[in-house]
Image (tube, coloured by chain):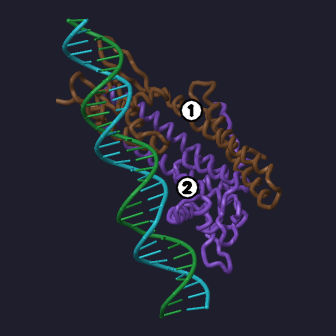
Chain colours: A brown, B purple, C cyan, D green
Amino acid sequence: MTAIGTRYNDLIMQLTPAELLVSDVIGRLIEFWGFKRNMGRVWSVLYLSTDPLSADDLRDSLKISSGAVSMTLTELGRWGVVRKVWIQGERRDFFSAETQLWKMVSRVFSERERTEIVSAIDALQEALQLLDKAKDNERTKLQRERVRQLLDLARLGLKLIDALLATGKLDIEPLARLRLGLGDR
Amino acid sequence: MTAIGTRYNDLIMQLTPAELLVSDVIGRLIEFWGFKRNMGRVWSVLYLSTDPLSADDLRDSLKISSGAVSMTLTELGRWGVVRKVWIQGERRDFFSAETQLWKMVSRVFSERERTEIVSAIDALQEALQLLDKAKDNERTKLQRERVRQLLDLARLGLKLIDALLATGKLDIEPLARLRLGLGDR
DNA sequence: CGAATCTTTCAAATATTATTGAAAGATTCG
DNA sequence: CGAATCTTTCAATAATATTTGAAAGATTCG
């Protein structure tokens, strides 16, 4: 006999159709977002579980190797989206998912996307300096203008990210508070 | 003798340090954004060129195969960020880059990111329906709530994208008009 | 302590994605 | 038309990324 959608000792865990669907969707979305699909799938299963799960539960339910489970959990832990949970009387480790979605998303934005764009801005500024030193012909002039446009876009992206992140700095339910608008000028 | 940073007939084109730097940065950024690095590099070289360039120019300056150039240009064409240019008296095709950055970025947002999130929303709604039909125990209740949270986030993402896209619908320089704020409620 | 159980690591195997270059297909020119 | 030139396609190759599973390393229990 098998346990469907929940864990019982010594029984092989199976996912319900809903769990299967969600872990699949989130896996795909997370892959689209530049992470590994399994990260999304493992997190999803934990996120939908009433109780913390063991590495074996995850291996069985997602049908991936124990090595993959271990590596995926480590990576998820580094992003702070999965934590190890102590269960008394249990020898093995159990894991549960972070459930504050905004916390998770904003961390990626601040640690990954933001970093990426800042480094692009730096490099574009460097390029602009090269162009300032270059012979002052038509081509150089055009290139200065074009690189400036790129810089403007990159800086706008940075602003956007920072505005997004700022919404979460203060209050409890940042998702509800976000507002996007058009300036007058 | 070689032409540096510009094209002359029958001369092998070389990139200037600034061009090299920019095509590298943009290549990386575009790869981070889920496209192929060469797409970013090819577009960059065109974007910084005073005149349209031929496939050979791109092959030589970026040191990639002619096949890669052709495929990359086709793909860039599909995204509307590079266009074929007719040059009189020239037998081969020439290409130039779209320079309206917002136009390019918003197209990707509307055709790729938006689609992706809409399909995720659909699937999550489907999952919610499965859960509505499921036995009404604690686990099911928890999962309904969790999936609802995911849906809220996905819908917020969609709103954000749409707000972003709306800034560009009307006016000329959407980049300057974008404004992000916090709601009172 | 030593056996049992669990976790992590990592080299090898797979799978996926990107790139090349030559052949086939177009187009232009004389 | 037919040669010359240019472009595209695509099978083969190379480069990356992911996954496995067994061995090594920890930890817990009696």
**Which residue was labeled with disc 2?**
B38
Q: Secondary structure at mark 2?
A: helix
If the image is split into quadrants, where does the N terminus of chain A sit?
A: top left
**Which residue was labeled with disc 1?**
A106
Residue displayed at 33% across by 31% down: A67
Q: Position of residue C5 (x, y in %)?
A: 24, 18
- Name the chain under label 1: A
In the figure, residue B7 lies in which quadrant?
Answer: bottom right
> As rendered, which of B84 and D1 lies closer to the eye?
D1
- Name the chain under label 2: B
Q: Position of residue A168 (x, y in %)?
A: 60, 29
Both on one chain, marks 1 and 2? no
Amino acid type at circle 2 is Asn
Q: Residues within 10 Å of mark 2 (few under 14, many from 20)?
A: many
Amino acid type at circle 1 is Ser
Residue displayed at 68% across by 72% down: B9
